Amino acid sequence: MSWTKKVLRINLTKGTCTPEPLNMEWVEQFLGQRGLATKYLTEEVPPTTDPLSPENTMYMITGPLTGTMASTAGRYSVVTKSPLTNAVACSNSGGFFGNEMKCAGWDMIILEGKSPTPVYISINDDNAEILPADEIWGKSVWEADEWLHTKHQDPQLRCAVIGVSGEKGVLYSAIINDLHRAAGRSGVGTVMGSKNVKAIALRGSKGVTVNDPKAFFEATNAAKKILAENAVTGEGLPALGTQVLMNVINEMGAQPTHNYKEVSFAGASKISGEAMLEPRESDGKPNLTRNAGCFACTISCGRISTIDPQHFSVQNKDDLHHSYHANSGGLEYEAAWALGSDTGIDDLDALTYAQFVCNEQGLDPITLGSTIAAAMEMFEMGVITTEDTGGIELNFGNAEAMIKCTELVGKGEGFGLELGQGSARFCAKHGHPELSMTVRGQEFPAYDPRSIQGMGLGYATSNRGACHLRGYTVASEVLGIPVKTDPLETEGKAGLQIAFQNATAAFDSAGICIFTSFAWSLEDVAPQLNAACEGEWTPERLGEIGERVWNLERLYNEAAGVGACADKLPPRMTSLPANTGPAEGKVSGLATMLPEYYAERGWSPEGDVTTETKARLGL
Amino acid sequence: MSKVTVKLFASLMQYLPINSTKHHGFDYDITKNPTVGYLIDDLKLPRNVIHIVLLNGVYLDAETRDQKVLTDGDVLGFWPPVAGG
Amino acid sequence: MQMSLVIDANKCTGCLQCEMACSYEGEGVFNPTKSRIKIFPFHEEGIFVPYTCTQCDEAWCMHACPVEAIQLNKATGAKEIINDLCVGCKVCTIACPFGTVNYNADSGKVIKCDLCGGDPECAKACPTDAITYQDANWTGYDKMKDYAAKAMPAK
């Protein structure tokens, strides 16, 4: 139980929807969600496959806890080969789509091949159909979502949709479910668009059961109590969301600013979580209306926000764009730093508007903001001019320019399509590859590796390209969770990253949100899984699964040509010292940490997974 | 007279003095006892809530922070336990 | 003491823990489509509203039932469906002005909130106290207290 043990395989070339049993042998080794879908990918898609060809396959998958009453158990992941990085992609989303998939009786939906014409997938329990999407191709996520609800006359339909950016080949398009929850990174929406699939519309009425209900309620109630009593998950995240970090990271001098030239931003407090609570002049309302929860989430960090009706971004929006005058999914820290401090923009409403556009058109705001920031730096250097930008004065701090770029990327038009290739390709094209703040072609998140050393190692070794959600040592280095370590110190960071990376891979394979890990360890997850699932799931076994998943991803990347050779940071991180704050004069100590990391991973000094390690993990 | 800037964030904002410039903090005059511990008590900040204390951006260990001596121009930031990502 | 479900929409985050608790109690499965309580998200207004049966004294559903399959539980005040008697005619679903009695096609019977026999699972599952179970004579107590606090003279 808990797994439905059923997979829906959709071949878009042939136009077929075929049920098949879930491979339960692989479940034993990889649990579910991130781990299990990665196993399918590595078995079915050769590592050298062109990510945007019909030979690439996309896996939408739940975890064993998805759809149950365990806290945060509504997650699903999208696994595929990334067009941005050429590496394995795995993007995780909340909302209400994952649980609905499980309720309809499916652990996983596989999209393979390519449809000759635009289509969407309609799933109602056992019935799956491939239907024409001509009427919504070219429409935004929000328009398509509304059309699907009307078409199926079902207000409880759950939809995962791509925006126009995903149709046009922007390389960091997201899949958006429930209007504003995103499988955001690495261009998973681009892959869906390349298959000519606009949306997946789900309805499930079967429900989910667990193996041992009594033990399940005991375990999940105990775990919920931990979340409620923890100051981070019970108080900080509901009140201020992820944006609570803006002031902390800025004050400690780790706030990436002006394309990572600087480590603090003078306008940070104006775009912080605290600022979102302050009433504005025009209508007396704060930016934040309230917090909201994804399915089953007892933390509820989601932001529901409005834009100042007097703000230039929305004051002339007509009725067709009424959503911009209403509440919608608000600003998260990763969007706020990338579109804000990295571009030198301290206009909270401009950033909220850009976040709305990212949701409406399905964009990863991290890669978007970083790419705009890199373009701004090149504009100020004179490397690109208004001739390249289509007339946009692309200076740091220009909110109108940032908004214009965001809209253009969202629609995949003109200069937007060029920015839509991501900073690695954009900077290389204009002769300055060193200005792209990426690893494996994916942009850094919100923490400067010179000021938080463990994160530099994390970015360099992250299997999906630079990312904070693969090994969030910020928790330890800045926030003291579970124990405080010195952010400027490199010693011990290899072991710390590995511990975080392995545990995260286990959380990501279970069907729950990684934010629970601020309060839970695998000791708290194991009893919940053990009660929900058949078999015995101990913390040790989960830790081993996490390590196995990490190594499997690494092996795939090695074979795809983005293994050890891509474990590096841009020169700015290793040769340009931080200019202010506690890290002043420091560069990333990656060269020191990486050999330790390889050794502690049980890899060769060159960074390859060794035969012994493979054998130990059963790979 | 020596002055330090005190910044209070997240749920600690409720302890800001009236008329302070919110996130930019407020000035605090060091009088007889220039330690962080004295400042915390003088401002009646809740010790059970304070988790992260940054002095000019540098984290102060919970065990030793009370004895830390402040000097003119220091910036002191306080947070409850917070995390995100 | 008779008790009532008290709903405070301002506290609801839309997480659906209540819907799962309800469907599990009623049907033995985590399945929001089988819940007697529903959360209605109003996206543009930014609010989530829990809604379920208020257990009317002169319950339209109970009076409309032609086979007396809806009966008062004197201990809890709930109007309960007697499954052995229900013929699935759905007249009660028409009679209820609030839409809180619904047909379950899988069982061929109607379903509605029965207060779980006096220990409602939705209220226990709610992480934010948006749904509570309180003295039926004092469902306004918290709201009164909130306003009293606002009216309290400043210290």
Image (cartoon, rainbow, N blue to C red):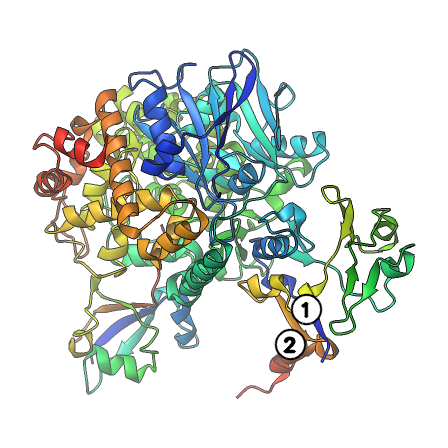
x and y, in percent, of residue A478 in the image: 25, 57
The residue at which mark 1 appears reads as C6
| Chain to which the residue tagged by mark 2 belongs | C
Q: Callout 1: residue from which chain? A: C
From the viewer's perspective, tell me whether residue A454 is left or right of residue A97. Answer: left
Q: Residue furthest front?
A: C84
Query: Which of the 4 quarters of the picture holds residue A382?
Result: top left
Measuring 8% from the left and 42% from the top, which residue is drawn there? A592
Check disc 2 and give the amino acid type: Asp
The residue carrying pointer 2 sits among few (fewer than 14), some (14 to 19) or many (20 or more) residues within 10 Å by Cα, namely few
Residue A447 shows in this picture: no
Q: Which residue is mark 2?
A: C142
Q: Is residue A27 above or below residue A277?
A: above
Examine the image and state in which quarter residue A36 appears: top left
Is A41 positioned to the left or the right of C30 in the image?
A: left
Residue at the image position 30 percent from the left and 40 percent from the top: A467
Percent coordinates x, y for residue A393 in the rendering: 39, 32
